[in-house]
Amino acid sequence: MAERAGAGHAMAFAIKTEISEPRAKAFVFTAQKTMYGGKLIAAGDIVFASESEGGTGLIARAVVTSVEPVPRKPGIARQTPRVSIAVRRVALAKRPLGRDALKRFKDWDDGRPETELNFKFYRQATNKIVGISDETAAFLDRFF
């Protein structure tokens, strides 16, 4: 596993996945794909949860309570690292932020938080956990 930059301080991540009970106080996300540094997620980190199955997008800000790496399957050369995480919700989004709001941010080099989210969430359509920049975390905080 790669070293976490700034060990000791919480990092920010976002997860795009199906969320069956958006108002739950805690969530468990099992065997989630990780991309863009998502495999570095650890207990104590902040995660922004976004619903991917036709919902409003951004749902909750949560604190990671546990992380369990999923063992790789033997005999398969290329595998995306997967983790199971448990989180405790600390805030519900006060306004939506979904694919419709992000899809126009396509200039991959513009440095905007909206572009980072569009790229990491929607360039490949799969559900996943991704690492996000401090700037994007601050942008997402404005939705709570």
Image (cartoon, rainbow, N blue to C red):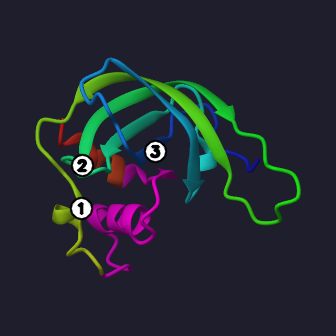
- Tell me the residue that label 3 is attached to: 13
Question: Disc 2, disc 1: CB below 8 Å?
Answer: yes
What separation in Å lies between label 2 and label 1 (alpha carbons)? 7 Å
The answer to whether 115 is drawn above or below residue 126 in the figure is: below
First in sequence: mark 2 or mark 3? Answer: 3
* Crowd tier of the residue under label 3, counting other residues whose Cα lies within 10 Å: few below 14, some 14–19, many 20 or above: many
On residue 99, which mark appears? 1
Which range of residues does the magenta coloring cover? 107-135
| Residue type at numbered disc 1 | Arg
Please report the residue visible at 30 percent of the width from the left and 61 percent of the height from the top: 113
* Crowd tier of the residue under label 2, counting other residues whose Cα lies within 10 Å: few below 14, some 14–19, many 20 or above: many
What separation in Å lies between label 2 and label 3 (alpha carbons)? 15 Å
Q: Mark 3 falls on what kind of element?
A: strand
| Residue type at numbered disc 3 | Phe
What separation in Å lies between label 1 and label 3 (alpha carbons)? 17 Å
- Tell me the residue that label 2 is attached to: 57
Please report the residue visible at 55 percent of the width from the left and 31 percent of the height from the top: 85
Q: Is residue 83 magenta?
A: no
